[in-house]
Image (tube, grey):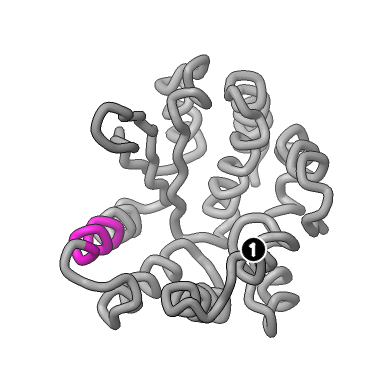
Amino acid sequence: MNAKDAKNLKDFDKFLTENCARPEIAADRLSCIMGVIIDIKPSCIIDFNLDDAKNMDMKKFEKFLKDLGLKFYYEKTDLGEESFIRFTHTYFISKTAETLDLIVDAERELYDHFDENEPNSPVIKIIHRKIGRLLGYPETATDWFLIRTEKMDLDEMDKDEYMKDLQKYHHFIHSRTNDEEEFIVYDRPIHAAMEKYTPLSAKLLRESKPEKRWL
C-alpha cells in the first residue's frame, strides 16, 4: 500500500470512529471496506442507520471511498412497517464497476425472488451462493449458513444452538468443521491490515467484543 492510501486510511479511521454514534459499528463497517482494499473481498455491503450516521457527513464518507480508489453505489432503504419507518444508508462497494454491478444486481435478484419463493428454495440458495462469493466468504462458510437457515426453518435447531455460531468470530458465521481455515484466509489478513492501517477501529473491535477471536 502506498503512503497516500495509508494516510487516507488513517484519516478515514479517525473520521468514522469520531463521527459514528456507535463507533464499534463504524469499526465493523471499516473491516469490510478493508477486506475490499486488500483483495480478500471482491465487494462489500455496509449500512449505517440514521442514529449511527446522524453526526456523520456522508459526502465526506463518500469522498474517502473515492480517494481510496473504490467504486460505490448508494441506496437509502426503508426499514420497519406502517407508522414506524426508519431509514438506513446502504453502500455497495468494490474496486471495479463490473463487480459493483454484479453485487447490486445479485442483491436485487435476491429480494425479487423472495416474493415468489420459500427462503430455503433452490433458487434462493443459488443466489445466496452468488452473493457469498461476491462478498469473499469461504464456500464452506456459505454451506454452513445455508444449512443453519434450513434447520431453523424446519425447527431442527433451537435459538440457543443457532446463536452458538455467532459467539467466536467477527464478520460472518464460520462453519463448525472448517472454521480455522476460514479464519486464516479471511479474518486474519483483514485484522492484520487493520492493526497496521486503522488502529483505532482495530482496538474497538478487540475491546468491544473480547470473546471473539482477533489474531
Q: Is 12 left or right of 41, judged from the image as shown?
A: right
Q: In which quarter of the image is the C terminus?
A: bottom right
Q: Is 115 left or right of 92, judged from the image as shown?
A: left
Q: Report x, y in % for residue 110.
A: 27, 63
Is residue 110 rendered magenta in the image? yes
Q: What residue type is labelled 1?
A: Met
The image quarter containing residue 107 is bottom left
Residue 188 visible in image: no
Element assignment for label 1: helix
Is residue 195 rendered magenta in the image? no
Against 14, is 180 above or below?
Answer: below
Q: Report x, y in % for residue 112.
A: 19, 60
Graded by Cα atoms within 10 Å as few (under 14), some (14 to 19) or many (20 or more), the crowding at tag 1 reads few
Q: Which residue is drawn at 62% across and 47% down?
A: 31
Q: Main secondary structure of the magenta part?
A: helix
* Camera-side residue of 102 and 89: 89
Q: Which residue is drawn at 59% across and 65% down?
A: 159
**Dot 1 corresponds to which residue?**
163
Residue range in magenta is 106-114
Against 194, is 126 above or below?
Answer: below
